[in-house]
Image: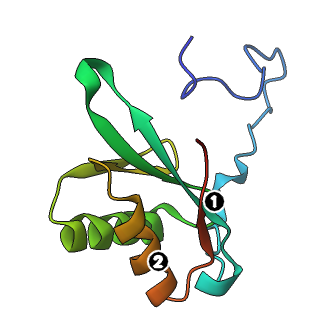
Amino acid sequence: MSKKNNKDGFVYSTNKNFEFENNDDEPIESLAPQMQNLKIYLDRLGGGKFVSRVSGFVGNDNDLEMLGKMLKQKCGVGGSVKNEEILIQGDHRDKILKLLIDNNYKAKKAGG
């Protein structure tokens, strides 16, 4: 069963008046940049390619997408935003750290 169809363990109800309550209606508020605790990792993908990964963002998906777009543009490379993380192609940790700090984000390098 895919995660999209899973209703917190509910599979079937015999109650004819049962209505599933969906708590996803409330939009998630993004924390202010100085309240964020972002970590920048360097991962190696298959074939020896590097990817810089930014994790720890607390907020809605639109703000995360906008931050990811800004980082991709400033670094001049491709990347993506998925699983609540920003992936930037290549080893750009120093540049990403400087960009985040210049934009008042609380960020640091993490990992090895």
**Circle count:** 2
Q: Which residue is mark 1?
A: 25
Who is closer to the viewer here, 103 or 47? 47
Q: Percent x, y for residue 35?
A: 70, 80
Residue 56: name its quadrant: bottom right
Name the outermost residue toward the left.
Answer: 76
**Sequence-first disc among 1 and 2:** 1
Name the residue located 46 percent from the left edge and 88 percent from the top edge: 103
Specify few, some or many for label 1: CA neighbours under 10 Å numbering under 14, 14-19, or 20 or more. Answer: few
- Please, what secondary structure does the residue beneath circle 1 have? helix
Label 2, secondary structure: give it. Answer: helix
For the residue carrying disc 2, how many other residues have a C-alpha within 10 Å: few (<14), some (14-19), or many (20+)?
Answer: some
The amino acid at mark 1 is: Asp
Q: Tell me the quadrant of the picture where the C terminus can be found.
A: top right
Q: Are marks 1 and 2 in contact (CB under 8 Å)?
A: no
In percent of the image, x 82 and y 14: which residue is there?
14
With respect to residue 3, does 79 lie above or below?
A: below
Q: How is the image coloured?
A: rainbow
Horizontal and vertical percent for residue 53?
A: 45, 49
Residue 66 lies left or right of residue 90; in this view the side is right
Pick the residue in front: 83 or 11.
83
Percent x, y of residue 108: 60, 66
Distance of mark 1 from mark 2, alpha carbons?
30 Å
Mark 2, residue position: 100
Residue 33 picture location, percent across and down: 59, 83
- The amino acid marked with disc number 2 is Leu
Give the vertical position of 26 relative to 82 (above or below): below
